[in-house]
Image (cartoon, helix red, strand yellow):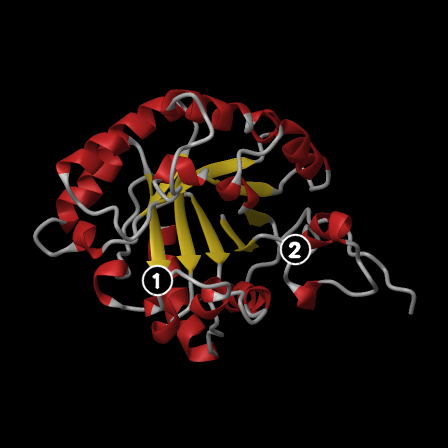
Amino acid sequence: MIYVGVTGWGDHDSLYHGGVSQRDKLKEYGAHFPIVEVDASFYAVQPKRNSEKWVSETPASFRFVVKAYQGMTGHQRGEIPFESKKEMFKAFCDSLEAYRKSGKLAMVLFQFPPWFDCKRENVNYLRWCKAEMGDIPVAIEFRNQSWYRPNVVQQTLGFIEKEGWIHTVCDEPQAGEGSIPVVLHATDKDKTLVRFHGRNLHGWQRPASGDNWREVRYLYRYNHQELTEWVEKIRILEKESKELYVLFNNNSGGDAADNAKQMIELLGIEYEGLAPKQLGLF
């Protein structure tokens, strides 16, 4: 099974017509895609009422990839708003209850920052994270090239598999140390995550400062040839995992939803069990 979707559901203007309100966008989103990445959980551990609402607004077959809170991945600057890291992890895991009870949790995504490089201290931290998450499925995404250097890449993949992480395969600009190559390898026989970040090299190298650096970084629209080349890659991964979760994150210019729909068409997928589309006035 291949699930294709995008990151977040609020900013994809091409999906919403007829004045769909912000609070109703997820209901409409579920008519287009069978999966979404929850980004709000990165900025704050979400209250249970939010996940309960989101679960109730989506079809039975819908799945969520929930992004790990920034304090858990080392993005948070300054002190974490918890008594300890252990308490932080517990609060986050508790916030997943509605997803888990409904069977709609695909995985939790730990996306580590560019400065999280391949060294013993960080390897030990990954082991600790995995232990704290218990039996919750967790995916790992690196942003530092040191994990995939030729002399360590097989050790990295072996470690991810041995420790029970889901490997995240990324398409992103090749910008040196702060980016990773495409590594077509599944570490989990059940699930693999694929994330498309675009190929805006200039934006990727831009310092993470100012008000609009995110908008610049993910400003990119994949063309037909680039997506077609990825069809073969996805077919390779499909042989290694029962389920593939493919997410487009290139939404600075509103391109993610369109590219995701193109990919669904190229893969020849027709989803069943999506939500009914809202009918406009005309």
Look at label 2 and name its amino acid.
Gly
In percent of width and height, residue 173 lies at 33, 68
- Residue beneath the point at 33% across and 46% down: 112
Q: Do the residues labelled 2 and 1 touch (CB within 8 Å)?
A: no
What residue did someone put label 2 on?
A: 10
Which of 95/244 is in front? 95
What residue did someone put label 1 on?
A: 233
Instruction: Report which quarter residue 55 is drawn in.
Output: top right
Quarter the C terminus occupies: bottom right
Instruction: Report which quarter residue 265 is drawn in.
Output: bottom right
Of pointers 2 and 1, the one earlier in the residue sequence: 2
Which of 225/175 is in front? 175
Q: Is residue 58 left or right of residue 157?
A: right
- Residue beneath the point at 57% across and 41% down: 63
In percent of width and height, residue 277 lies at 78, 56
- Residue 171's place in the image compared with 63, above or below, is below
Look at label 1 and name its amino acid.
Lys
Q: Crowding near pointer 1: few (<14 within 10 Å), some, many (20+)?
A: some
- Residue 200's place in the image compared with 209, above or below, is below
Q: Crowding near pointer 2: few (<14 within 10 Å), some, many (20+)?
A: some
Number of residue marks: 2
Q: Is residue 65 left or right of residue 184?
A: right
Q: Is residue 48 left or right of residue 279?
A: left
- Residue 200's place in the image compared with 195, above or below, is below
Image disc number at residue 150 = none
Secondary structure beneath dot 1 equals helix
- Residue beneath the point at 44% across and 26% down: 88
